[in-house]
Amino acid sequence: MRKTRGPAALGIVGDELMLREGPMPRATVWPCHMLGRRVLRAAAKKASKKSAAKEKRSAEAAATRKTLVRISVKMTPLDHLKSAVSITVITLNLAIWVLLLVVLGSAKFLLPPFRGGIDSLLALVYRTAVRINDLWLRGVMGISWDRPEAGVAKDEVCIVLSNHASWSDILILQSVISLDGPLLKFLSKRELVFIPIFGVIFWAFDFPALRRGAKGTVDEATRRRMDAEALDAACDAVREHPAAMMVFAEGTRFSEEKRESMSSPYRTLLPPRVGGLASIREALAEDADILLDVTLAYPEEASFWLFLSGRLKTVGVVIDRIPLETVPSSREGLIPWLSDRWQRKAARIEVVRGGTR
């Protein structure tokens, strides 16, 4: 083939596509039928991923509807009214602090020399909001949950590991740990950042927002890099101003449908994932001494709406204090370790439920 000089040239000769750019000793050649197959395969793979994601979202929505229907059968009109009042109180409790959080959050970044004092004010806001929720749910609605001693000081860095049964888990964990101990910081999905009130809270308190639910928007390597950067930034903030990094190892809330789809070996839990815990364990290895393994045991299927009505009068809470040095640092070592912890959790939940559903 002749050498090509001059500007880039693109042409088709017979059934071959030739790309020539600048002086080249030989033209680069791709058979057109091979190029077409590659394009078609890539398009089919992309369409397949979109279809799978759509089916997953539809399945999750259907599972949520089934759960709501199942729970609604147990609730009276008065129960629904109580739940509506409770969610209104909790939402207003969050909303009234938003303007102050915007001011304090902005000042934290604009006035670095005063960040220590500003973070103290933010901690006061956090605990005040938690106390208001606690007073409403425990004092007014009559909901009770165990209050075991976490044994962690407010200025101590630690990691908190828990099963995830319902949105109510967050309210209970904040009450048990953050009122007398460090503030809880949650690994959250990036989509939640765009919800008005939640977005301000996550931003002001440096909650790491991960792209776990946005895999289709960027390639896998970029997504992992951005998640690692967000997590590192959150851990840097924890080192400067001690807090508790919260990990829900199951990655999502429990439901019977999810348990079946994931082929979970546990009746009341989803299988744990090691990714989030492994990353935080590595990032805080030099700063945290304790891992708090929390088991939340509801007497029946945990629905946030049912919880808000006051129907679930007692929730079991068990805390195991585990020296961080005894927790495996590698992902390979964490797999059997987490499996053992989850077997213990499953046994405890079965005891609370009396061995029945």
Image (cartoon, helix red, strand yellow):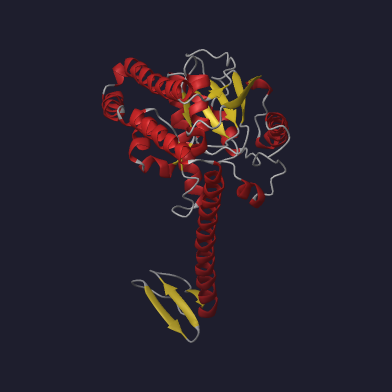
Q: Which sits in the foreground, 291 or 310?
A: 310
Across and down, in percent, residue 284 comes to 54, 25
Residue 64 in percent (x, y) is at: 52, 49
Residue 293 visible at all: no
The image shows residue 38 at horizontal and vertical percentages of 53, 71
Which residue is painted at 47% across and 33% down in the image? 308
Q: Quadrant of residue 198?
A: top left
In the displayed structure, would residue 24 be above or below residue 124?
A: below
Q: How many marks?
A: 0
Instruction: Please name the residue shown 72% across and 43% down the image.
Output: 265
**Is 2 in front, or is 186?**
186
- Residue plotted at (51% across, 44% down): 224
The C terminus lies in quadrant: top right
Q: Quadrant of residue 255?
A: top right
Figure quadrant of residue 74:
top right
Outermost residue toward the bottom in this view? 14
Location of residue 49 in the rendering, given as x and y in whole percent from the top left corner: 53, 61
Q: Is residue 187 visible?
A: yes
